[in-house]
Image (spheres, helix red, strand yellow):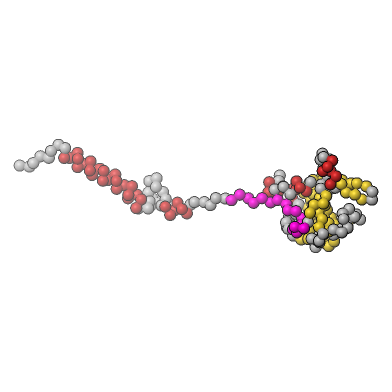
């Protein structure tokens, strides 16, 4: 006579088989490295994910002008004249020539030793000339309507039409009729759209962010 299975045997057996099948599914999907034809949500292996990680884009480096010299012996002897400065400050921003005081249109740099003049920022040499009072000069035009002028050069190392980069040598310091004849000088002027600006403000401009 065939023996009857007890009522609880069949459900228990089916439950064990069902659990084994469920546990084997994710293992199969992972070890199978997810074939491209698989419709599961697991699309990539670990190596594929690594290949799709994109590098973080670094910030754009600032592009600010530099002072038009490198030597540490150079010092500021005259400030740019501001009409709203206190009288004590304005006294150091006046030029004296033939019994007349004149407001300084730039910064006068001086040194007891000769020093090289460098381009403050990238640009194109627009003009080279000589002034009766300020001496030889170089005019460089830059992006966004900016222009720099370098006065009192004894020698000029560039020509009109040349393109220069920030820090390129454009000449050597010299003398003018406004500074101390015993020193080497550079009068540095900066303009924006034809108007004078304080060179100290010009040094703080980030040309990557100028409209």
Nearest the camera: 47 or 101?
101
Question: Quarter-wise, where is residue 158 in the image?
Answer: bottom right
Question: Quarter-wise, where is residue 165 in the image?
Answer: bottom right
Residue extent of the magenta highlight: 58-73
Q: Is residue 199 visible?
A: yes
Rendered residue at 8%/41% (across/down): 3
Rendered residue at 85%/44% (across/down): 91
Residue 162, horizontal then vertical, whole percent: 78, 60
Nearest the camera: 147 or 106?
106
The residue most toward the front is 88
Tell me, yes or no, whether the highlighted magenta stretch contains residue 93. no
Residue 8 against residue 74 in the figure, above or below: above
Residue 164, horizontal then vertical, whole percent: 75, 58
Question: Quarter-wise, where is residue 185 in the image?
Answer: bottom right
Rendered residue at 66%/50% (across/down): 62
Tell me the quadrant of the picture where the C terminus can be found.
top right
Tell me the quadrant of the picture where the N terminus can be found.
top left
Left or right of 124? Residue 17 is: left
State the predominant SS element of the stretch in magenta: loop
Nearest the camera: 75 or 37?
75
Q: Is residue 138 visible?
A: no
Residue 85 against residue 179 in the figure, above or below: above
Left or right of 88? Residue 16 is: left
The residue most toward the left is 1
């Amino acid at each position: 006579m065939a023996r009857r299975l007890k009522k609880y045997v069949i459900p228990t057996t089916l439950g064990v088989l069902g659990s084994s099948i469920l546990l084997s599914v994710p293992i199969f999907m992972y070890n199978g490295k997810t074939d491209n034809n698989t419709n599961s949500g697991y699309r990539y292996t670990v190596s594929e994910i690594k290949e799709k990680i994109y590098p973080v884009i670094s910030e754009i480096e600032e592009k600010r002008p530099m002072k038009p010299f490198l030597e540490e012996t150079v010092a500021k002897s005259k400030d740019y004249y501001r009409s709203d400065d206190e009288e004590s400050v304005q006294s150091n921003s006046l030029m004296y020539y033939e019994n007349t005081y004149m407001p300084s249109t730039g910064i006068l740099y001086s040194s007891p030793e000769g020093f090289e003049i460098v381009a403050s920022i990238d640009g194109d040499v627009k003009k080279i000339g000589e002034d009766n009072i300020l001496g030889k000069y170089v005019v460089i035009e830059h992006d966004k309507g900016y222009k720099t002028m370098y006065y009192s050069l004894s020698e000029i190392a560039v020509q009109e039409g040349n393109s220069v980069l920030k820090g390129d040598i454009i000449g050597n310091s010299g003398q003018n009729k406004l500074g101390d004849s015993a020193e080497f000088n550079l009068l540095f002027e900066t303009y924006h759209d034809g108007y004078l600006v304080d060179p100290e403000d010009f040094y703080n401009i980030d040309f990557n962010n100028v409209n």
